[in-house]
Structure formats: structure tokens, C-alpha cells
């Protein structure tokens, strides 16, 4: 999806932040590139800065997806980024999947 659509979708799902899932606590909503190579570049930048807005800047013209960061503390403690696509939480937590 395009950047502005991803931003709208992320904003419509801020109610998910802080909710508990079977995998842990949702700490953040991120927008990331779908291309595997660009995704890896995004992940490296995100793990280094822990700033999703800064990390996505160079990818705003790419195809994007919205995801949920689970237990963000694991990045600093163990260098592990655990996140899931937003669509996995439609039934469990009432994620909104259609952008405006």
C-alpha cells in the first residue's frame, strides 16, 4: 500500500497499543516495506534507532505494510524484533484493516 494509506491504517489501530496477545504486549505500530531486501534494511535501522518514523523515511515510496511490535524491550535486551502483521489481529483484538 502507499505511505499515506499505511499512515491512516496505523492511526486507525492505535487502540491496539498496550493490549495483550498470546505472544506478548503490543507496544508499537510500525509501517515497513514489503520488499524483502528493503525490509531487512528497515529492520536494521529500526533496531539501531528504535524510531519507526525515522526508520521508514527512505522507504516511503515503496509498497508498505502495517505491523505491530510485540514486547519492544526484547530489541534492547536480546536484539530480537518480534512483530506481526496487523491482519493477524482482526479477530483477536478488533484490528481495523480497511484504510479510509
Image: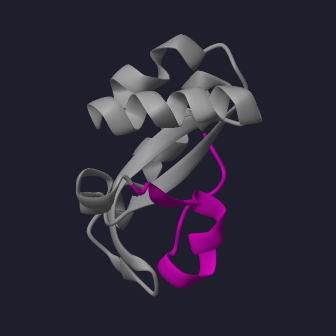
Task: Tell me where residue 19 appears, x and y as whole percent.
Answer: 32, 75
Tell me the residue at 67%/25% (across/down).
Answer: 2
Q: Position of residue 38 (x, y in %)?
A: 66, 26
Q: Report the residue at 46% width, 15% height from top.
A: 57
- Is any part of residue 1 visible from this angle? no
Q: Is residue 19 above or below residue 64?
A: below
Q: Give the quarter of the image for residue 3.
A: top right
Q: Position of residue 55 (x, y in %)?
A: 42, 25
Question: Residue at position x 24%, y 51% from top?
Answer: 76
Q: Write the residue at 30% across / 58% down.
A: 72
Viewer-closest of 71 and 53: 71
Report how many numbered discs are placed on residues in the image.
Answer: 0
Left or right of residue 68: residue 37: right
Q: Classify residue 15 as left or right of residue 92.
A: left
Q: Is residue 57 visible?
A: yes
Q: Is residue 85 magenta-colored? A: yes
Q: Position of residue 33 (x, y in %)?
A: 64, 32
For the residue pair 34 and 81, the one nearer the viewer reads as 81
Is residue 44 inside the magenta stretch? no
In the image, the segment drawn in magenta is 80-100
Q: Residue furthest bottom?
A: 22
Amino acid at each position: 500500500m502507499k505511505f499515506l494509506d499505511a499512515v491512516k491504517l496505523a492511526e486507525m489501530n492505535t487502540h491496539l497499543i498496550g493490549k495483550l496477545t498470546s505472544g506478548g504486549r503490543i507496544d508499537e505500530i510500525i509501517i515497513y516495506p514489503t520488499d524483502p531486501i528493503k525490509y531487512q534494511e528497515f529492520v536494521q535501522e529500526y533496531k539501531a534507532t528504535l524510531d519507526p518514523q525515522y526508520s521508514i523515511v527512505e522507504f516511503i515510496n515503496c509498497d508498505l505494510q502495517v505491523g505491530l511490535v510485540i514486547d519492544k524491550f526484547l530489541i534492547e535486551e536480546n536484539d530480537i524484533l518480534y512483530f506481526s502483521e496487523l491482519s493477524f489481529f482482526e479477530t483477536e483484538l478488533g484490528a481495523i484493516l480497511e484504510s479510509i
